Amino acid sequence: DGGITQSPKYLFRKEGQNVTLSCEQNLNHDAMYWYRQDPGQGLRLIYYSQIVNDFQKGDIAEGYSVSREKKESFPLTVTSAQKNPTAFYLCASSSGTSAYNEQFFGPGTRLTVL
Amino acid sequence: KNEVEQSPQNLTAQEGEFITINCSYSVGISALHWLQQHPGGGIVSLFMLSSGKKKHGRLIATINIQEKHSSLHITASHPRDSAVYICALSQGNLIFGKGTKLSVKP
């Protein structure tokens, strides 16, 4: 059963704490992405990775960090430097990064900062 | 900057109605994607278009590259079609519209 999993579904954190969101895929995809979704706005790209051990900043990378040590995994850390971290976070993967590659999305993690 | 605009933002329809959601954009693209986001948040890809028209079941997507416009049509709408429909431009990475929230009443 191929797909993308994100955990947890809901996450609460206290202000000032770092938190790591998990994203795992078994589609054998090279490329992985993290997006943030806020009410009334389109998805915005945080970070993406085209290959293991390499990643690039997206449009809103400040306050976030990622790693890509394994092809299957692309965890996102929301640091205390992120000013407004409460949002819905979506992970995606694709077989490549050309314009014609379909992206497959995980179910998302809703992060709430208390 | 609003490179991609969707209309309408919200749409309520009665079951069985024909539905059209529009997407206009202002930049050159290689392809355009239509995505569906369910109430729980999960997103699935419906279509990828670089020209012409595609059909899958009751869903039809069209694109006019010269006019920088795409439409998503749903024929014989059903309450299970209720979701947010998102247009995304592809230049490599995706540029997402804000989405159209569709509610189909029985």
Image (tube, coloured by chain):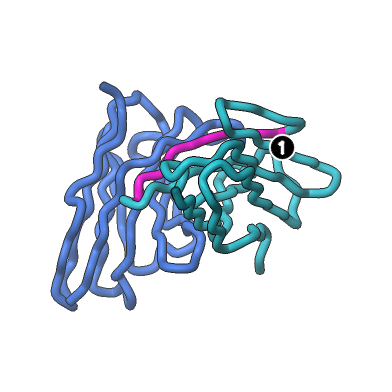
Chain colours: A blue, B cyan
Which residue is depicted at the point 28% across and 27% down? Answer: A26
Residue B82 is left or right of residue A114, and the answer is right
Count residues near mark 1 (Cα–Cα under 10 Å), then give few for <14, some for 14-19, many for 20+: many
Q: Quadrant of residue A20?
A: bottom left
Q: Tell me where residue A98 appears, x and y as whole percent.
A: 58, 34
Q: Which residues are magenta?
A: B41-50
Q: Tell me where residue B73 appears, x and y as whole percent.
A: 64, 41
Which residue is depicted at the point 26% across and 63% down? Answer: A78
Let me know if residue A11 appears in the view: yes
Which residue is depicted at the point 53% across and 58% down? Answer: B12
Q: Quadrant of residue A85?
A: bottom left
Whether B43 is among the magenta residues is yes
Whether A99 is among the magenta residues is no
Q: Nearer the viewer, residue B40 or A54?
A: B40
SS label for mark 1: strand
Residue A65 is left or right of residue B80, and the answer is left
Check disc 1 and report the residue beneath it: B62
Q: How many marks?
A: 1
Amino acid type for the residue under numbered disc 1: Thr
The vertical placement of A105 against A111, above or below, is above
The vertical placement of B47 against A7, above or below, is above
Let me know if residue A71 appears in the view: no
Q: Tell me where residue B63 appears, x and y as whole percent.
A: 74, 39
Prevailing SS of the magenta stretch: strand
Q: Nearer the viewer, residue B40 or B57?
A: B57
Q: Tell me where residue A97 appears, x and y as whole percent.
A: 53, 35
The N terminus of chain B - image quarter: bottom right
Q: Nearer the viewer, residue B82 or A41?
A: B82
Residue A14 is left or right of residue B10, and the answer is left
Mark 1, chain letter? B
Q: Nearer the viewer, residue A59 or B57?
A: B57
Q: Which residue occupies the extreme top position in the image?
A: A1
